[in-house]
Amino acid sequence: MLRRMLGIGILVLPLVHLAAQDIDANITVQNRNPSTIADQIRDPVERGAFIELSRHAQPAEMLERAQLFLKRFPLSAFLFQAYDVAARASFDLGQYGPGLNYARQSLQLLPENPLLLVSVADVEAREHHNDAAIADAQDALEYLGRFTGPSSISAERWPEVKRKLEASANFARGRALLEQALALPRAEDRPLLLKKCESVLRQAQQQNSADPEITYLLGLAQLSSGELEAASASFAAVYKAKDALAPKALANLQTLRKTLKPDVSLEIFLRQAEERKADVSVNAGRGETHDPSYQVPPAYAGSDSCRGCHSAIYQSWSETGMTKMLRPYAPQNVIGDFQTDNQFYLGDEAEFQDGKIELRAGAKQTPFARMVVRQGRHCFEIKQSDGAWHTYPVDYTIGSKFQQAYATRLPDGEIHVFPIQYSRVAKHWINYWKIIDGPGSERTDVRTWEKLDKATSYQAICAVCHTSQLKNVKNGGFDVKNVQFKEPGVDCEMCHGPSAQHVADMTLNEPYPKQALDPPVNFREITSRDFLRICAQCHMQSALRTPGAAGELNYSRSGQFFPANLSIPFGEFSRKGFYKDGRFRQTTFIVEALERSQCFRKGGVTCATCHDPHGHDAAANLKSLKFPDQPDLMCTGCHAQFQSRSILAGHTHHALDSEASRCASCHMPRIMDSVLFRARTHRIDDIPNPEMTLQFGQEESPNACLLCHAEKSADWVRHELKSWRQTPRG
């Protein structure tokens, strides 16, 4: 076990070169940010210690560095990295108990770390923590399937590393399952668990056929199942590899020979066992054959084609924010102040902190932009480096609820977004990118506007989520000169899929059989994972956009219509996206937050559990909530016990009709930064954690209790929660 894990650990150790990806940006294989995490650390002493922490050394020295970092910088935003290094170094030193403690602290801050989870599962299986090993190995496999490789491992090398990690995760699962099966008091209860164990170990063997330890464990599982010939074939393969396990394999082979073929020599028995192994390998390779061709999805019909049959839904949808993500210019759609408070100065500052926006006039103000109406047309006038004012017409509006951006179309067809946006919340023009981006972001400097390059390009940065059926007509990537979209805004077919065939068949009154996920999608029948994947097309910040073979940029023409975007590891993002306690700070990570919750992982909650994308009251119900006047219904549909007022009173310890007794007040507190206001976290099972708040403070670990009881302390919260646990519920 240690030899295999040490080899993988060395590959993933470098930390300082991970990218610090901007928030609220379209991430592609072309623009994955090459800046470093160390650039985000302002304290030069902490930065130096972090860089030192990332340098490879012997395990004892690595552990000492990590422990020193944790002691000196207990409020660092990068504790998850330090705990990770301490855990790996402890494992390498054989200090499994302390290593698991360090790992748990790292995973509390960054749960989606498959590289660490694989090591943890392997150690847990070794230490006989079987349930934990199985759970952590399964999480590791899920995350290996969801995320790309870290920046510290080249794209060419990652597939091999990933296969070995998957093999190690399955090895840990198999080891734990085998021990669980053998521990069952009745032999007749074992077959099902042993069968599962064998299946898992065969997966591991396929993922890393060169590892004799996997094959040896498979042989033990087969032996326990009474599959003696299969076991002899596995042990023969291990013996032939002349690995350290060869003597144990030989001992098992000698026992099996006496049972199966006592009249033949060991040499003949070995040869026959090897032949059986070869036959198994050949047959395994004759499994399912996959037709490389695929059924091309039907063509896109456009939203107007839905209106005839689905007029009420169409009308409701047309009033939602989705249709207004991008709209061709119309004076009545403009929400910004183009007449009174309509100037922006270089030197002015806007800071959003703790849910509040603070505007400060600069000591030396230099005029940069005037937002005006000229001959009935809304325009931006921008003072550029030549000292002259340049006028650009507003050709598009972006957004409609809380904030609005504006874009102009150049003669060559490129669309560029003005660097100044209007906040309806602040009632002011702001440099929004400077508020949310990390240091070094090009787009935070409004003077880059006149370059009219990718930093302001709508096609490169925004269009993937704000327009429908985005495509590069020359089959390339997010090239600003060759990108076109079918419809502005988010149309019906972004969610329901290409429906031209459906429209044609329904027009001819020829119903046809289809699966729930076939266009148009029947959302009532698909899995919660597929449901979320469809919403994640726009609502997943971490998605790495990879162009399709025919130039598709936010849809797919092969397989399912929605692209299967992998995510880049969360550790690569600007820390502005996270609190120091590991929770997501920005609403652009709303799907990622929901995926962390047990409501999704075990309960199958989807976006539509709480939201109605076709809501009939979009103007008044800006968040498209299903039950805006009875929000608890979004929770008590599953947690039915809390429909009882007495049980609810005992659970909340607050007056039943108070805001504090609403489910969302404690479990979805308003701690996520949206467009200059606080939104609810979508890690729905969030529970107030006073220990984290005591460590990091309310600003970096906001506690739901202290959002109301602001005059109290985290220590008070800890005392209150302890007293609740000791009080019998009603």
Image (spheres, rainbow, N blue to C red):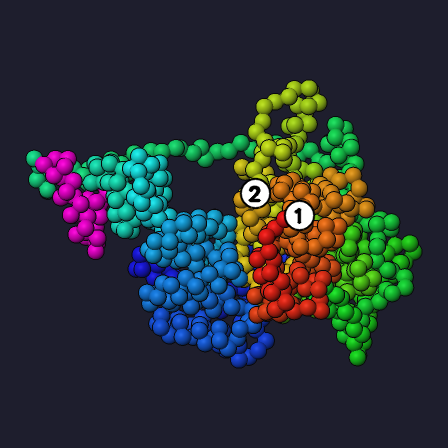
Q: Residue at x 81, y 55 (%)?
A: 394
The mark closer to the camera, 2 or 1, is 1
| Vertical relation: 349 (above or below) 208 | below
Q: Position of residue 294 (x, y in %)?
A: 51, 33
Q: Nearer the viewer, residue 613 or 348?
A: 613
Residue 236 highlighted magenta (yes or no): yes
Q: Residue at x 64, y 60 (%)?
A: 585
Q: Main secondary structure of the magenta part?
A: helix
Amino acid type assigned to the residue bearing label 2 in the image: Gly
In the shown orientation, is residue 71 left or right of residue 679? left
Q: Nearer the viewer, residue 85 or 18?
A: 85
Please provide the residue range marked out in magenta.
233-262
In the shown orientation, is residue 1 left or right of residue 462? left
**Residue denoted by label 1:** 648
The CA span between labels 2 and 1 is 20 Å
Residue placed farthest to the right in the image? 375
Q: Position of residue 636 (x, y in %)?
A: 65, 42
Amino acid type assigned to the residue bearing label 1 in the image: Leu
Q: Nearer the viewer, residue 535 or 596?
A: 596
In the shown orientation, is residue 146 left or right of residue 349? left
Q: Judge whether residue 668 can be spotted in this image.
A: no
**Residue denoted by label 2:** 603
